[in-house]
Image (spheres, rainbow, N blue to C red):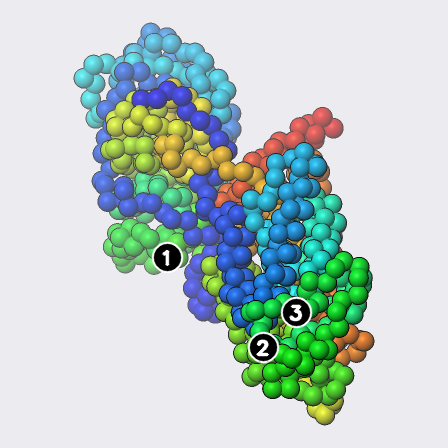
Amino acid sequence: MALMQIFAGKRLHRGLHVPDRKEATNRLPIRRMPFAPMLVVPLSQHTGAPAVAIVREGQEVVRGEPIAKAGGFVSVPMHAPATGRVTRIALAPGARGDLSPAIYIEPYQGASQEILYGAPQDIESMSPAEIVQAVQDTGVVGLGGAAFPTHVKMKAPEGKAIDIVVVNGCECEPYLTADHRVMLEQPREVLHGARIAMKALGAAQAVIGVEDNKMDAVRALHAAASGSIDIAVEAVAARYPQGAEKMLVKVLLGREIPSGGLPADAGLSVFNVATLAQIGELLPQRRGLIERVVTIAGPGVRRPGNYLVPLGTPLRWALAQADCTRDVSSVILGGPMMGAAAGSLDLPITKGVTGILVLTKREVNGNSRIHPCIHCAACVDVCPMHLNPSRLGMLARKDRYEEMETDYHLIDCFECGCCSYVCPSHIPLVQYFRVAKQMNRERKARA
Amino acid sequence: MNTVVEIRSAPHVHSGRSVEQIMRNVVYALLPICAYAVWLFGISAAALIATTTATCVLVEYWSCRMAERETSVGDFSVVITGILLGLILPPGLPLWMGAVGAFIAVGPGKMLFGGLGFNVFNPALVGRAFLQAAFPVAITSYTPARALHRFAEFVPTSLAIPFLKAAPLKDWMARVQVDGFTGATPLMLQKFEHVTTDPWTLFLGDRAGSGGETCALLILLCGCYLIVRKMMDWRIPVAMLLGALLTGGAYHLSNPARYPGPLFVLFSGGLMLGALFMATDPVASPVTPLGMWIYGLLMGFIAVLIRFEGGLSEGVMYAILLGNALAPLIDNVTQPRAYGQRKKAAVA
């Protein structure tokens, strides 16, 4: 296997090359975004149980103070993003068009962005279980977009040993440069976070995978890691969707995560670089996650950049800071390949928002005529999971959802969008698959 | 700032590839082959290609009208069918027969299945197979290449009146003969008269045959244009040519006196045109990587088998039609192993 990798180079064999369009923001340092007049902190901005509010309406809060506690083990607390007053606890719009409870905080005029809340703690003397608890207290979740509570991944499942911590610095989605800037500006925090994860999991090694369109980040991490033998930094050839954890572990280590399994089943735990940077920064100070780096880019903004955005900032405010143009046609949370279109500009920026992409009418050419599948096999050649999107699409058209799952591994599709991207017939394959998965879930729920 | 935002499902970007673009480029790639066919066989070839193409387009337009759906002529796939059909017929074939073949190709061969994407067989080959069955003499009557006066007058059979006996070609042949050329194709010469044409002549294409099949070099160049632009899958033509080369080579080694060399096999008949422009019809070929190789190798093998063992001098057409019929089955048994799965996808 090792020999094979030397000859093949570390690269993804399926997937595709998407124009990365990162040049507009990849050289712009991270800068702070001012507080919006109202911050909206949803209680459920992570995978798992919603947090439980511990503040009352009308209460004053200090920037960094906990305002909600975790609602279980797979849940995280929330912290006040600004010093101000809780005006109400009420329903707020969510990214999926739903309404969910949120804490509305009105920052005080002239409130400082300095964080006074917190107390130093000594990580060296902590046990793995104490680290997991401390990580949960920071409220950090996967900042690569999944928003899965990070402390859960820092606890090895019963009977499974984690030997390697994989750090994901691929950021393969076009336009996004937030992780790139974090690696450049906070390489020490990234490495510190990786060491904390290694300690919690009892892993002897960590490997950081970075795509080779960010060689400056590779060098920064190398410099910060110089002299350490337990953390390796690897450059991998840029190719979408290498940032998907299943792809990255295969490219870096040749391991496959079994279908329906977790990275732990392959002896791994995978973390995003920005997540570890936050852990590395917050944990020693016993602070909470109250802001994150968000790339705001796309043809619809005149002042693109990498902004350190207080969580709960409404999209409308963030877009105004980036000087949004008038002919906006859609606003996407995340990258153009997998990001969800925001249904409203009143949505708050939450822990899982990696970027905001603003497209104008010109880029959105969704009105192309859909032709029947011509079996050109372009989708089969790009599917990183080695599925047969052509056949799956045909079955979806005939409502044969069950067969898609039993015979063609629909469940393994992680909706990277490669098939839809290349389809010359403009068949919305990924959309078909999402519908099919939902139909299958509903059928199982009925049964 | 606009407050109305559109909601679409990800991905929000597209490669820009479209069916129309691919089909249009295939048409472009066929044009040099058409031009060479016209240079070699004159206005009869031009008239035949024009007739089949026009008929194909009309039939598709008309079928869409009858089915009360938006016309699909604009996707250019029917133009490819028309041109290809014109290129795989003997250049002196009566034009009315060309029109009949075109009707069968697009009517029963494509539109009855549901149009682009649903046809099981390559429509142009369906049309030709019909003509082969219906008019066995006409479709094996080839005219010599570079005949005299070919740009001034039609081959007498071209303008034959439907269902009437065409004027005999003998007098005309005597008048336009170049250097003792006969109308027999190199495959016919090899099979029935045991005269093997030099592969180099075949490669450059100065020979009798169906209008577009003669120049292997030109067909390869045009095919490469599509492959380089990633509008054609290289695996199928390579596999098919490899299959024919290996099978032909095995025959030649077993009896060099009786069977021609592998280069003759490669450059003669319709193999090159078939491998690059007919077998690659995506609609009727497999989608799995392994399936494409099996499909190509199988077609190359069968084509040579028919040539050497069958009663016909050429076997590419039936080889590809058979391959088309097997494509769904090949797909079913060659599903790739999905990431993270221990077993291959079940055979449906």
Pick whichever of labels 3 and 2 is earlier in the sequence: 2
| Labelled pair 1, 2 in contact (Cβ < 8 Å) | no
> Which residue is found at the position 51% from the left and 52% from the top?
B24
Residue B331: x and y in percent read 69, 56
Q: Quickly name the residue at label 3.
A: B155
**Is A385 left, or right, of A217 in this rendering?**
right
Badge 1: chain ID: A
Mark 2 nearby-residue class (10 Å; few <14, some 14–19, many ≥20): some
Badge nearest the viewer, 1 or 3 = 3
Residue A344: x and y in percent read 42, 21
Amino acid type of the residue that numbered disc 3 sits on in the rendered structure: Val
Q: Quickly name the residue at label 1.
A: A234
Which secondary structure, mark 1? strand
> Which residue is found at the position 63% from the left and 79% from the top?
B176
**Is B116 left, or right, of B226 in this rendering?**
right
Distance Cα–Cα, label 1 vs label 2: 70 Å
Distance Cα–Cα, label 3 vs label 2: 11 Å
> Which residue is found at the position 50% from the left and 20% from the top?
A98
Mark 3 nearby-residue class (10 Å; few <14, some 14–19, many ≥20): many
Amino acid type of the residue that numbered disc 2 sits on in the rendered structure: Leu
Q: In the figure, residue B321 lies in which quadrant?
A: bottom right
Identify the disc placed on residue B148: 2
Residue A338: x and y in percent read 46, 38
Q: Nearer the viewer, residue A289 or B51?
A: B51
Indicate whether A68 appears above or below A201: above
- Looking at the rendered structure, whether the residues under marks 1 and 3 are on a common chain is answered as no
Q: In the figure, residue B154 lies in which quadrant?
A: bottom right
